[in-house]
Amino acid sequence: MSSEIQAQGGSKKNVLPLIMVGVVGGVLIGGPTGAIIGAPMVARSVTGPAPAQGEAHAEPEEEGHGPSIYTMDDVVLNPAGTEGQRFLIARVALQGVGETFVEDMTARDAEVRDVVVRLLSAKTVVELADAGRREAVKKELQGALAARFPKAGIRAVLFPQFVIQ
């Protein structure tokens, strides 16, 4: 009888580490998987259906030369220093002037996204989350885009959606 009690007690001790490994493994695998797969789905459910990737939204032009808006949906990245544990989902809009601004930016969507992701992913969560610093980030992004696309005429950078998790 005492051997049965010892066997039961011993098996409970052996099961506990397995349960802990399972829980820790689930958190380590489930967290990043949920961030990568679930975050864009949550963002779309909150903001409504997104247009096709790289699809531009143009505002009506005033007298044929007013501002045009080019929008990039679902810009997803990991801020600096987060080791993949945090992420940013943003919708980035560029305001420019000219009849072909939206078409030009649409044609160079991959290049525009590269500049945006590179600059924003170099920022820490503290820099991105602080609303007081957001204007400085927009100006820095505008400068980086103007340097990359000098003829585009980018007048402003807007963040219609900016969610940090």
Image (tube, grey):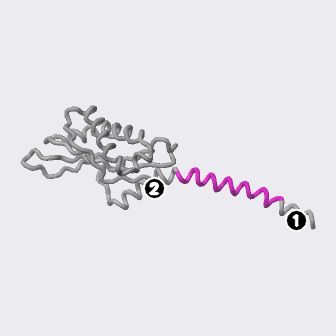
Q: Which residue is mark 1?
A: 5
Numbered mark located on residue 38 in the image: 2
Q: Amino acid at mark 2?
A: Gly
- Kindly indicate the quadrant of the structure image that contains residue 95: top left
Vertical relation: 63 (above or below) 122: below
Residue at x 27%, y 39% (from the top left corner): 142
Q: Is residue 20 above or below residue 137?
A: below
Q: Is most of the magenta stretch helix, strand or loop?
A: helix
Return the residue found at the far front: 132
Residue farthest left in this picture: 63
Secondary structure category for the residue under label 2? helix
Q: Residues within 10 Å of mark 2 (few under 14, many from 20)?
A: few
Residue at the (41%, 49%) spot, across then down: 88
- The kind of residue on which mark 1 rests is Ile
Is residue 70 rendered to the left or right of residue 120? left
Residue 126 visible, this angle: yes
Compared to 17, does 64 lie above or below?
Answer: above
Verify whether residue 26 appears in magenta. yes
Question: Which percent across, then down, holds residue 139?
Answer: 29, 41
Q: Nearer the viewer, residue 86 or 37?
A: 86
Query: Where in the figure is residue 19, as x and y percent of width and height?
Result: 69, 57
- Specify start and end residues of the magenta stretch as a single range: 10-31
The answer to which of marks 2 and 1 sits earlier in the sequence is 1
Q: Nearer the viewer, residue 17 or 144?
A: 144
Residue 58 part of the magenta-drawn span = no
Where does residue 147 sit, x and y in percent of width and height?
27, 32
Tell me where residue 47 appears, x and y as whole percent: 33, 59
Q: Is residue 4 left or right of residue 98?
A: right
Quadrant holding the N terminus: bottom right
Tell me how far mark 2 sits from mark 1, CA to CA. Answer: 46 Å
Q: Which of the 4 image quadrants contains residue 103? A: top left
Q: Residues within 10 Å of mark 1 (few under 14, many from 20)?
A: few
